Amino acid sequence: MKNLVIVESPAKAKTISKFLGSDYTVMASMGHVRDLPKSQLGFDPDDNFKPKYLVSTDKKKVISDLRKHIDKDTTIYLAADEDREGEAIAWHLIPALKIEKNPIKRIVFHEITKDAILAALANPRDVDQNLVDAQQARRILDRAVGYELSPLLWKKVRYGLSAGRVQSVAVRIIVDRENEIRAFIPEEYWRVKADFINPELKAELAKINGKTSKVNNEQEALKIEDSLNQGIYKLTDIEEKDSTRNPAAPFTTSTLQQEASRKLGLSVKQTMIVAQQLYEGNVGNIPGHTGGLITYMRTDSLNLSVVATTAAKAVIDEEYGKEYSLSKPRIYKSKAKGAQEAHEAIRPVNLALRPSMIKSYVENIQYKLYSLIWKRTLATQMAQAKIANTTYKIEAGKNKEYEFQVKGQRIIFAGFMKAYTEGSDNPESALDSTEKILPNIEVGTILELENLECEQNFTKPPARYTEASLVKKLESEGIGRPSTYAPTISTIQAREYVSKTEDKKLIPTPTGEVVNSFLVDHFSYIIDLGFTAKIEEEFDEIAEGKITWEQVMRDFYGNFKKIIDEKETSVNKEDYLQVREIGTDPKSGKPVSARVGRFGPFIQIGTKDDEEKPKFVAIPDHLNMDSITFEEAMFLFTLPRVVGVDANGEEIKANIGRFGPYLQVKTKYYSLKTDDPYTVELPRALEIIKDLDEAKEKSTIKSFDKEKIQVLIGQYGPYIKQGRKNYKIPKGIEANDLTLEQCLEIIEKDAKSPRSSKSTSAKKAPAKKAAPKKTTAKKTTTKKSADK
């Protein structure tokens, strides 16, 4: 083999192989091939933090397959991604493949096109050890925090918990916001609105005696209303101002994640998955196009190449006309700490490839994300928008002491807005980009009032973070880098330290809060935003060759390890027991408490010291262990409840189990997917049972009731089920022809296979499941004038 090109993913390998001749073989390493061992610290603090890298178990076959294509004369091109993680992947391949004596060339590119790949092959470089060391520093420092701190959490809080350097900071940000919301005291204020007719106009009180209006209570509002009813409404001034708007900068990783969340409803992780597909060209066959559709999607640079700005101008001239393009490119400078300006922002590799040209050949979500990137890139090189802002000022009140205002705007020249306007996390601000044309009225006109409304309002607490706004916060604080945002946010949800509300807001779980409390109390510097940002800056300095990674570890590890050792003896586990006494059970006289167990928060009646085993029930998601009332807690114990009887006179019971809410008839169980076990009525229960019985009958090929064995049809084809265990039917055996003896033989063989292992589990607290939904009548606090 003459030349072997090693990339990270099969999709990328497939795309790049189309550009190269038969002298090149392109293969994938499937990401990192070596890592620190999972079962030990993985580095030696006494030997200058020397890491112990091992080929990952799941990568041994990858290494073996790559080795088959290498002989002593093979030139190896290491073509991992152009960032620190990619540099480290390339570096690890050398010892893993034992290719130190082979000709090795490191090649990089930020887009997967034929020109970019050929240019990279023509301009190879060596592996950049500074970038590798920056990645090593992050990996080893993060291992130190996780490996040393997690066992302490097990001992002092609860087994199975874990801590992470960046993840724990992200949890702290979310917990701090939740505490702000809890501590928030709403303040009353009133808005005074006037609706006019002939012509129609909606105005709001803006000034009182020349000063910005502030109406604190109903008494003040009624006083204003009284004065307004004794005067007239006169248009006294029309103020007109022209303004200009500039387009938002081209996409970086974080801004793409934010905008895809706002406009497409994608999670941070989903955005990166689709962006990776577009970058690698892992899309349908687009006529006339080969390769990736966008440039590299992990970047904090706002730079656009001359090729890109030139192409943008040509497309703008053609699509919108020359008045919409610029005479010279608009340049953006990044404010992000440690931004790599040598790289490019995220943009289409070929702006001439319109979204409409790919729509029929790619998945819908790929089309939508590409369209977003295409429009944003184009807008960055389009002319400013010109807006005419108009304000009508209306004099009112007995003594002309009040000023109402109406604001409108007209787009004089759309400019970049013709292609794209940036979204916002604040829905109200979205109105700023819409035209609002005011009726033509002359100054001095007396306006005819149709309705006067005094509306009570209360100030709102700060909003919970969304995934997008958390990314924005992390970036603004200098925490993490483009490659870390998505995994950080995925990790804190996977560990169940943070969950999502129905409206996709991030909220800490009780477990997340207790872990955060422990870390704030004893390791506040670890989850301090400033400290975490400083560590990121040190990683940047390593990448620039200014400091060594070993020095960063020495500065961090000694003090950290000392504190770990101190906390082993000084921290009292009882301080972090998540127990809240909320009352006494009137029947048994035993204490009722809210607690957090391995599977989440639950209510318990009694204690482990009682002769009789304690009763417990999961706290549903819509209730919080910190605020659940005694009445709400005791209501949860009304399960199981008898819903009624079926046609055979058998009781139908509703309950919640480990796998969620269900109905039970004798020994048969029926899952309640959307219905509430506390409120489901008999007609609905019978309907659910009938539907599930019919569905089960359709999916059952054979049933051997005595041995509780069934042959069923599932999502992926026929399979055998015994009890709660499923067994794969070997190839060549027809499910319809299976006998009981064959089923037993398949089950027995499966039990003896190496992958089948027995496991034991500790006694579990009930999982968090749905419980009764309560509705509260919304109190109307609006006062309206008598003439409405």
Image (spheres, grey):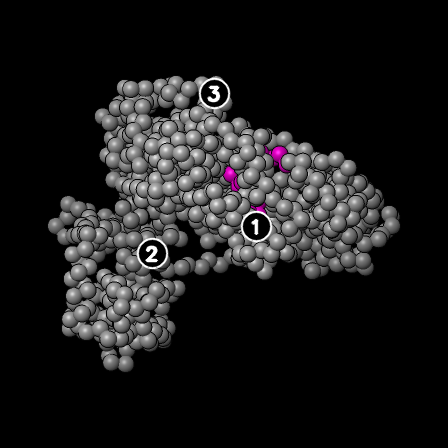
Query: Comparing marks 1 and 3, which lies closer to the viewer?
Result: 1
- Point out which mark residue 290 bears: 1
The disc, 3 or 2, on the residue closer to the chain's N-terminal end is 3
Q: Can you see residue 584?
A: no
The kind of residue on which mark 2 rests is Lys
- Mark 3 lies on residue: 545
Secondary structure type for disc 2:
loop
Camera sees residue 10: yes
386 left or right of 357? right
Q: Earlier in the sequence, mark 1 or mark 2?
A: 1
Q: Residue furthest left?
A: 611
Q: Principal SS element in the magenta part?
A: loop
Q: Can residue 378 be found in the magenta stretch?
A: no
Q: CA distance from mark 1 to mark 2?
A: 49 Å
- Residue 99 as seen in the image, left or right of residue 240: left
**Label 3 is placed on what type of residue?**
Gly
Among the two numbered marks 1 and 3 on one chain, the one whose residue lies closer to the N terminus: 1
- Asked if residue 774 is positioned above or below residue 470 in the image, the reply reads below
Stretch of the chain drawn in magenta: 292-304
Looking at the image, which residue is at 60% across and 49% down?
Answer: 372
Query: Residues under labels 1 and 3: Cα distance?
Result: 38 Å
- The residue identified by callout 2 is 769
Query: Mark number for residue 403?
Result: none
Q: Position of residue 428 (x, y in %)?
A: 63, 48
Distance between the Cα atoms at labels 3 and 2? 52 Å
Q: Give the residue drawn at x 31%, y 23%.
A: 50
